[in-house]
Image: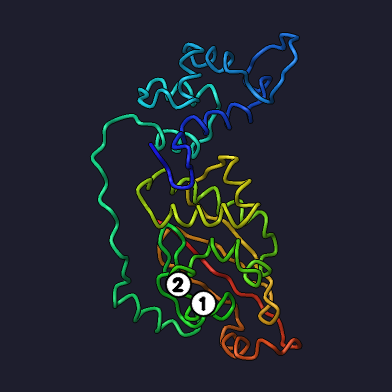
């Protein structure tokens, strides 16, 4: 199965090699045989031994010469590599387990009018609507003020992960940019496996791979995870500390602290460095 952002088209083999290299032989229960190791992690023969398959089969999998894999063998490989639940789900997603019908190409996503009215009605609560690629489909003034002026961006630029890597002003808001950015890459890789025909996602991964060395390195590590609750903290020069706690729905709602009514005024006066700081909590989610 070919995935966005992987020109080799051998996502399964690349993932197996990456996880094999990341696993300490001692943690896998293998004794030290005294032989020097030229590469980190498990040898191919050790993975074959643990998964009860032939060495040649592991080689063919990693080289992309075998793409159809039975579920029991995938289970054995996942057990041998001690994959976490998200990594196991990713393995199943990139492996050609069954002949699935071609997925319908996603059409242009539109936000329901009632949801737009709801966003407008949330005067003091920052809120926005995201899709699986973290494209910002809709937002209110409260959400734009601490982050960026989404209206000034083209639709292709309204992507939170794109802003995280390619917009210096947005990037500087993170208290822990590296940690947040790594999580973005891991989630995006999972989405790429689940939506291998998403051309917009492929274009996004391609652009970030070319333009940002950190993204390129982290994408190549094959770390994956599914959407889950995380907390991110931003440091806005005027508003102060902003804590982002994503839930699990496509509508990103934000609950602010006791100084919420002052929030929009602070955004309008973002050049006033002596403005009193306060805290705001944002809650996000992905379906």
Q: Quadrant of the C terminus?
A: bottom left
Give the answer, above or below, for where 39 lies relative to 113. Answer: above
User: Residue drawn at (62%, 61%), measured in percent from left and top?
Assistant: 232
Q: How many marks?
A: 2
Query: What element does badge 1 sit on?
Result: helix
- The reply to whether discs 2 and 1 touch (Cβ–Cβ < 8 Å) is yes
Q: Nearer the viewer, residue 281 or 80?
A: 80
User: Residue drawn at (58%, 52%), measured in percent from left and top?
Assistant: 183
**Going from the N terminus, do you reach mark 2 or mark 1 first?**
2
| The quarter of the displayed image where residue 96 is located | top left
Give the answer, above or below, for where 279 lies relative to 75. Answer: below
Question: Where residue 37 sits: x, y (%)?
Answer: 72, 18
Q: Nearer the viewer, residue 284 or 220?
A: 220
Question: Where residue 202 sits: x, y (%)?
Answer: 44, 52
Could you say which disc has been placed on residue 128 in the image?
A: 2
| The quarter of the displayed image where residue 180 is located | bottom right
The residue wearing badge 1 is 143
Q: Quadrant of the N terminus?
A: top left
Question: Where residue 103 sits: x, y (%)?
Answer: 27, 46
- Tell me the crowding category of disc 2: few under 14, some 14 to 19, or many 20 or more residues within 10 angstroms, Cα based: many
User: Residue drawn at (35%, 25%), measured in percent from left and top?
Assistant: 68
Q: State left or right for residue 225 relative to residue 217.
A: left
Q: Farthest residue to the left: give it.
A: 101
Give the answer, above or below, for where 128 lies relative to 239. Answer: above
Question: Where residue 137 sits: x, y (%)?
Answer: 40, 70
Q: State left or right for residue 115 relative to residue 163.
A: left
- Tell me the crowding category of disc 1: few under 14, some 14 to 19, or many 20 or more residues within 10 angstroms, Cα based: many
User: Residue drawn at (65%, 14%), measured in percent from left and top?
Assistant: 30
């Amino acid at each position: 199965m070919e995935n966005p952002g992987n020109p080799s088209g051998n996502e399964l083999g690349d993932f197996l090699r990456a996880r094999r290299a990341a696993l300490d032989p001692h943690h896998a229960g293998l004794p030290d045989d005294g032989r020097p190791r030229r590469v980190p992690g498990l040898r191919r023969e050790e993975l074959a031994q643990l998964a009860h398959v032939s060495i040649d089969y592991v080689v063919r999998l990693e080289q992309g010469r075998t793409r159809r894999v039975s579920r029991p063998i995938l289970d054995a490989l996942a057990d041998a590599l001690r994959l976490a639940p998200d990594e196991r789900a990713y393995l199943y997603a990139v492996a050609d387990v069954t002949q699935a019908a071609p997925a319908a190409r996603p059409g242009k996503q539109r936000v329901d009018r009632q949801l737009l009215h709801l966003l407008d009605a949330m005067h003091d609560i920052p809120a926005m609507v995201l899709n699986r690629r973290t494209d910002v489909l809709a937002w209110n003034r409260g959400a734009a003020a601490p982050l960026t002026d989404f209206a000034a961006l083209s639709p292709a630029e309204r992507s939170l992960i794109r802003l995280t890597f390619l917009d210096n002003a947005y990037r500087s808001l993170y208290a822990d940019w590296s940690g947040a950015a790594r999580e973005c890459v891991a989630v995006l890789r999972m989405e790429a496996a689940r939506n291998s025909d998403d051309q917009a996602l492929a274009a996004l991964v391609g652009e970030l791979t070319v333009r940002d060395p950190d993204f390129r390195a982290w994408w190549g590590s094959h770390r994956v995870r599914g959407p889950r609750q995380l907390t991110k903290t931003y440091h806005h020069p005027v508003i102060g500390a902003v804590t982002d706690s994503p839930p699990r729905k496509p509508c990103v709602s934000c609950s602010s602290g006791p100084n919420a009514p002052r929030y929009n005024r602070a955004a309008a006066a973002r050049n006033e460095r002596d403005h009193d700081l306060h805290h705001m909590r944002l809650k996000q989610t992905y379906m």
